[in-house]
Image (spheres, rainbow, N blue to C red):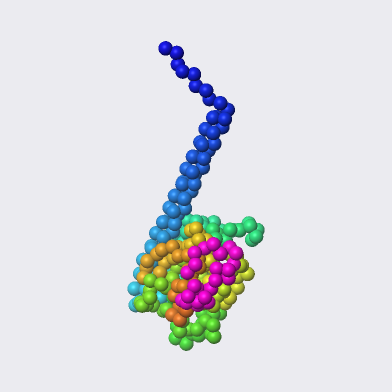
Amino acid sequence: MAKPKVNFSRRDLLLTILCTLFALANLAAVGSTSRRRAKEAVCLSNLRQWGAIFEMLANDNNGWFFNGEGSGSGYWWIDKLRAYNKDDKLRLCPEATKTPEGVPLSEVNWSHAAWRAGRKYNSNGDIGSYGLNSWICNPRPGITGLWGRNPPNYKIEYYFRSPYYIAADRAPVFLASWWVDGWSLDTDIPPPRVFYDDRPCSNEIGRFCVDRHEGGLGCLFMDWSARKVGIKELWTLKWHRSFNTAGPWTKAGGVRPTNWPFWMKEFKDF
C-alpha cells in the first residue's frame, strides 16, 4: 500500500522553525527565572546564617552589640564577626560576587557589584556584598558619635545597642549593599542612580538601594528573620530608634510616584 504524500511547503517549514524558536525562548526564560529565584533563596539563607552569628555575638556580650570602634573600611565589624565565621563566601549575595576593579565606573552595574574592604585576611581581597546597618552599635559611654556621624543629624540616642527591641521584625541589621556599612536617616533622598556621588554623612540609605532581586534585596532583621524587601520599602523600615517610618519618602508621608528617580519609578510603592 502506497504511503500518502505529505505536502510540506516552505511556509510550513518556516512556521515550524518559528514555533520551535518560540518554545526554546520560553524554556530559556523559565530557566532564567528559576536561576534568579534560586539565587534569591541562597541570599536569604546566607542572611539567616548571619542572624545566628549576630545572635551569638550578642549573647556572648551580655545582650549587647559591639561598640562600633576598630579599623576602617568595615573592618570594625568584620573583625568582630570573624570569631564566629571565617567563611568569606557567606558575605556574598550570589547576585553580587565580583568587585568592579578594572571596569570604568560608568560601566559598573553597582546593584550586582561586591565591595572590597582590603586584604587583611585574604590576599585576593576581603570582599562582600552585604552591608551593616550601623545604628545597631552600642557606643561606649561618653561617645557622641561614630566614624564622623555626629549630632545634630546623627544622635547618640538613635543607636539600638541591643537586639531586644519591640519592633525587631522591622529593624534591619544586615542587608544587600554596594558598601560595607551605612547610617540611614528618614530624610535621606533616593539616589539618581545606584552609586551616585556617595559621601559619608549624606544620604547613606543610597548604599542599600540595589536592585538585586527584581526590584528588591535581601534583608536580615533584628528578630533574626530574613526576607526580600522592596527598594522603596527601605524608607519604611526602622533603621534606628527614632527613624520616622512614615517620612517624606513613603506613601504615608505623601511621596508621589513621580517624585522618584527614573530608575526607581517602576518599583513597588510603600
Count of numbered marks: 0
Residue 195 place in picture, x, y as percent: 59, 65
The quadrant of the image that shows the N terminus is: top left
Q: Give the residue drawn at x 48%, y 48%.
A: 32
Which residue in the rendered view is the most extreme toward the bottom? Answer: 142
**Is residue 210 rendered magenta in the image?**
no
Q: Nearer the viewer, residue 115 or 42?
A: 42
Report the residue at 52% width, 40% height from top. Answer: 22
| Front residue (pair 204, 170) | 170
Q: What residue is rendered at 49% in x and 64% in y?
A: 268
The spot of residue 245 in percent (x, y) is: 46, 76
Q: Is residue 148 left or right of residue 55?
A: right
Q: Is residue 166 left or right of residue 88?
A: left
Where is residue 158? Give x, y as percent: 46, 81
Magenta span dominant secondary structure: loop
Magenta-drawn segment:
245-270
- Residue 103, image x, y percentages: 63, 57
Q: Residue at x 47, y 69 (%)?
A: 270
- Specify the quadrant of the image occupied by residue 109: bottom right
Which residue sits furthest top?
Answer: 1
Mark yes or no: residue 67 visible: no
Figure check: 201 above or below 142: above
Residue 5 visible somewhere in the drawing: yes
Question: Between 9 and 117, which is closer to the camera in this rendering?
Answer: 9
